[in-house]
Image (cartoon, grey):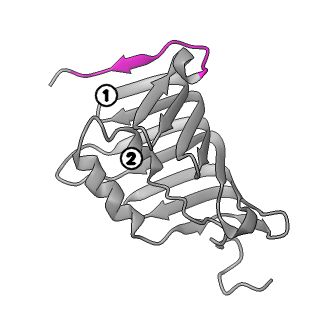
Amino acid sequence: MQSTNPPGKRSRGLGRWRPGWLAFLLLSMAPVWALAASQNEAQPILIEADSADIDDRQGVSVYRGNVEVRQGTSVLTADQVTVRHPDQKAQKIIAVGKPVKYRQRQEGGKPDIRAEALQAEYFTDSEELVMTGNAVLYQGKDSFRSDRITYDRKSGMLKGGTSAKGKRRVQVTIEAK
């Protein structure tokens, strides 16, 4: 299979995945985030990595080494990103890093949304995001922290700690205004 993209910069197999998924985690807390996330969905997805291995027969693409996934105002960085895409449609995206980092730029002077975890998995059909390993979400000085954080985009449900099948308690910090 030939590509017109430079080696290691191939984006095939991502289907409907949107790196702006973490912005949806906090939609219920700040409606302005919805606007930024919806604007990202219309933007192209750009992937850069030191290497890319794409196996269309097995339906798996693996991007390794300083992986950067951009879409609009969202950036995800990881050591490795694996996309499972049977029938050319992304079903599961797994990002691994030390840590995986995410940033969503906000408009109107609002602080950026940032997140970190050792691993993040996104299931496209159920629209569920699972972050594990020292998972933390920030906006400004506010934070939501646990060993496991899950977010169901369909229901808008955010869970941490034991309700997300984690083992540690949730720590939420809300700074005084």
Horizontal side of residue 70 vs 1, given as left or right: left
Which residue in the rendered view is the most extreme toward the right?
57
Horizontal side of residue 150 vs 114, given as left or right: right
Which image quarter is the N terminus in?
A: bottom right
Residue name at image x 32 percent, y 45 percent: 112
In the figure, 9 relative to 145: above or below?
A: below
Horizontal side of residue 131 vs 88, given as left or right: left
Tell me where the magenta segment starts and ends, as one range: 165-175
Residue name at image x 49 percent, y 23 percent: 160
The tag earlier along the polypeptide, 2 or 1, is 2
Give the x, y percent position of residue 123.
Answer: 60, 47
In the figure, 150 relative to 166: above or below?
A: below
Residue where numbered disc 1 is placed: 142
Q: Which amino acid, mark 1?
A: Asp
Question: Is residue 130 located in the magenta-colored stretch of the structure?
Answer: no
Image-quadrant location for residue 31: top left
Horizontal side of residue 136 vs 7, given as left or right: left
Residue where numbered disc 2 is placed: 23
Give the x, y percent position of residue 59.
Answer: 78, 63
Which image quarter is the C terminus in?
A: top left
Label the magenta part by its dominant secondary structure.
loop
Question: Is residue 170 located in the magenta-colored stretch of the structure?
Answer: yes
